[in-house]
Image: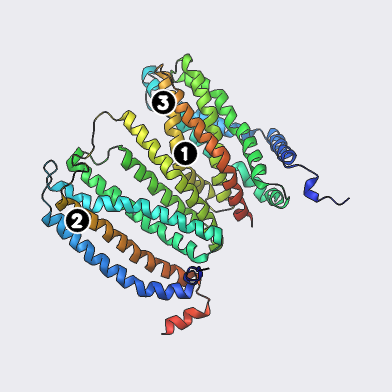
């Protein structure tokens, strides 16, 4: 079988070194791509015919919202891998995902709220997307609260994994139920005017921003997992060797 | 003849025994049943005091009040689902018994629902009438809450198993279960709302039923996995 790379990856010392080597690549490319996308989005892209310059919040808001869901899925998959194959490193990845995902969710909520003031005239609307994003934040907070209240790392890993898996089954149900609830209650339409028909000068920076956020996520995740590995393996012999170099 | 020990009692028989044991224990301690019920009645009493005694206004908020109160009192009750059994070692014996833990915990959850959820369903018409809900809507209110409280008990069991023996477990349980219960709240309250307006409420009721079936099939498995982690 060709699974040796997978088992090798799951070994903490190997992963620690590999992650240390990869982090700068992710970090610097994220910086470059995000700067380029910001320039494209804030300077080069024309103002929207309806929203003027206000639409530029989309360059932070949409990637953050997208990453908040993506991170949850990464967390749940890592948790499931850890639970099924009993790979400790996968649990470390899941544990590191939660604060990152919660931050992305918070950024999406705050930027959405700031966007709401000029566009909708209010800080908060019980819009379907906003509400399901808020519930996603609660799911992240619940996961982190559960982990932090269990002292034993292995128990925290496994209990957290079960919660993450239950959550990921529920995310689509929550999303569609909220959408359905909203479509029945809402009287005034508050959807954005631009729709999918975006000119390329607006769309390209947005797509670049998606890539940049992904790279940034990679860099932050690798850094956090390294920290997590150090904390978990603090009594292992290889830590001393690595740190003395 | 050397039969394996666990073959002497069938799995269904073991589950039935556990169900009867929980019922009998609860009958000896009435306050366990009364607490969620009193809580439910008190929350629903707060709303007329806080809003206005106007029945037309109360009728508008009645679906939300009924369902939020049911949700909160189910959460309150979920804390007691496994606590005493984990403390005195009964849960550990269930795990060691060789019987399918999923089935045993399903039996426990159903017993818990009969003791904490079913009483709510039975007093719900009284509360609903007091909130100005027309008599024609009471059937939908009860059907919705019957399935809804069952789903909440199953979700609460997951939360109870995950928070076994943790400090601030009770608060944590609410934080874990509330986001999972939101679809139920949406569909349940919607069915009541439609029924009050005199319209056909079968759509949201079917969705509540679907959530209940999903919870019935998947929640006991999850609860069992979480209980194994919690007890070791």
Q: From the viewer's perspective, is the residue at label 3 or at label 1 nearer?
A: 1
Q: CA distance from mark 2 to mark 3?
A: 54 Å
Is residue B20 or residue A47 the one in the foreground?
A: A47
Residue B108 position, x and y percent, is: 65, 40
Name the residue tied to disc 3.
Answer: B49
User: Is residue B137 toward the left or the right of residue B100 in the image?
Assistant: left
Please count the marks in the image: 3
Chain letter of mark 1 equals B
Q: Nearer the viewer, residue A74 or A233?
A: A74
Kindly indicate the quadrant of the structure image that contains residue A125: top left
Mark number displayed over residue A205: 2
Image quadrant in which the C terminus of chain B is located? bottom right
Q: Residue at x 26, y 46 (%)?
A: A112
- Provide the secondary structure element on which disc 2 rests: helix
Q: Which residue is mark 1?
A: B181
Q: Nearer the viewer, residue B125 or A56?
A: A56
Which of the colour schemes (rainbow, by chain, secondary structure, one colour) is used?
rainbow
State the SS at label 3: helix
Q: Earlier in the sequence, mark 3 or mark 1?
A: 3
Q: Chain of mark 3?
A: B
């Amino acid at each position: 079988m060709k699974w040796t790379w997978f088992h090798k990856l799951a070994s903490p010392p190997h992963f620690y070194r590999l992650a240390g080597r990869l982090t700068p690549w992710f970090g610097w490319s994220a910086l470059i791509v995000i700067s380029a996308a910001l320039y494209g989005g804030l300077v080069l892209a024309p103002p929207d015919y309806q929203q003027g310059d206000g639409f530029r919040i989309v360059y932070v808001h949409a990637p953050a919202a997208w990453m908040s869901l993506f991170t949850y899925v990464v967390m749940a998959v890592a948790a499931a891998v850890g639970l099924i194959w009993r790979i400790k490193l996968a649990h470390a990845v899941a544990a590191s995902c939660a604060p990152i995902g919660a931050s992305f969710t918070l950024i999406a909520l705050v930027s959405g709220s700031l966007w709401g003031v000029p566009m909708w005239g209010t800080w908060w609307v019980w819009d379907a997307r906003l509400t399901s994003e808020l519930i996603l934040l609660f799911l992240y907070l619940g996961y982190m609260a559960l982990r932090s209240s269990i002292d034993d790392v292995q128990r925290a890993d496994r209990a957290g994994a079960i919660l993450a898996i239950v959550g990921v089954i529920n995310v689509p149900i929550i999303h569609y139920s909220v959408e359905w609830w909203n479509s029945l209650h809402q009287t005034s339409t508050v959807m954005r005017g631009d729709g999918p028909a975006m000119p390329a000068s607006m769309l390209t920076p947005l797509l670049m921003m998606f890539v940049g956020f992904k790279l940034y996520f990679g860099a932050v995740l690798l850094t956090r997992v390294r920290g997590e590995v150090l904390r978990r393996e603090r009594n292992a012999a290889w830590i001393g060797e690595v740190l003395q170099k | 003849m050397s039969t394996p020990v666990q073959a002497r009692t069938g799995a269904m028989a073991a589950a039935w025994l556990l169900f009867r044991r929980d019922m009998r224990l609860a009958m000896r301690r009435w306050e366990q049943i009364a607490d969620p019920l009193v809580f439910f009645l008190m929350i629903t009493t707060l709303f007329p005091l806080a809003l206005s005694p106007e029945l037309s206004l109360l009728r508008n908020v009645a679906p939300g009040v009924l369902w939020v109160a049911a949700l909160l009192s189910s959460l309150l009750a979920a804390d007691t689902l496994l606590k005493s059994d984990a403390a005195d070692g009964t849960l550990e014996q269930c795990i060691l018994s060789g019987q399918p833990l999923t089935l045993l915990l399903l039996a426990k959850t159903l017993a818990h629902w009969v003791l904490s959820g079913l009483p709510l369903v039975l007093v719900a018409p009284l509360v609903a009438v007091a909130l100005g809900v027309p008599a024609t809507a009471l059937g939908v209110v009860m059907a919705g809450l019957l399935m809804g409280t069952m789903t909440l008990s199953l979700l609460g069991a997951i939360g109870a198993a995950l928070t076994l023996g943790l400090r601030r477990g009770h608060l944590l349980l609410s934080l874990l279960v509330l986001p999972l219960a939101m679809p139920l709240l949406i569909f349940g309250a919607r069915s009541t709302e439609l029924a009050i307006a005199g319209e056909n409420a079968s759509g949201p009721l079917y969705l509540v039923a679907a959530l209940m079936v999903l919870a019935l099939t998947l929640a006991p498995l999850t609860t069992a996995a979480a209980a194994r982690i919690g007890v070791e």
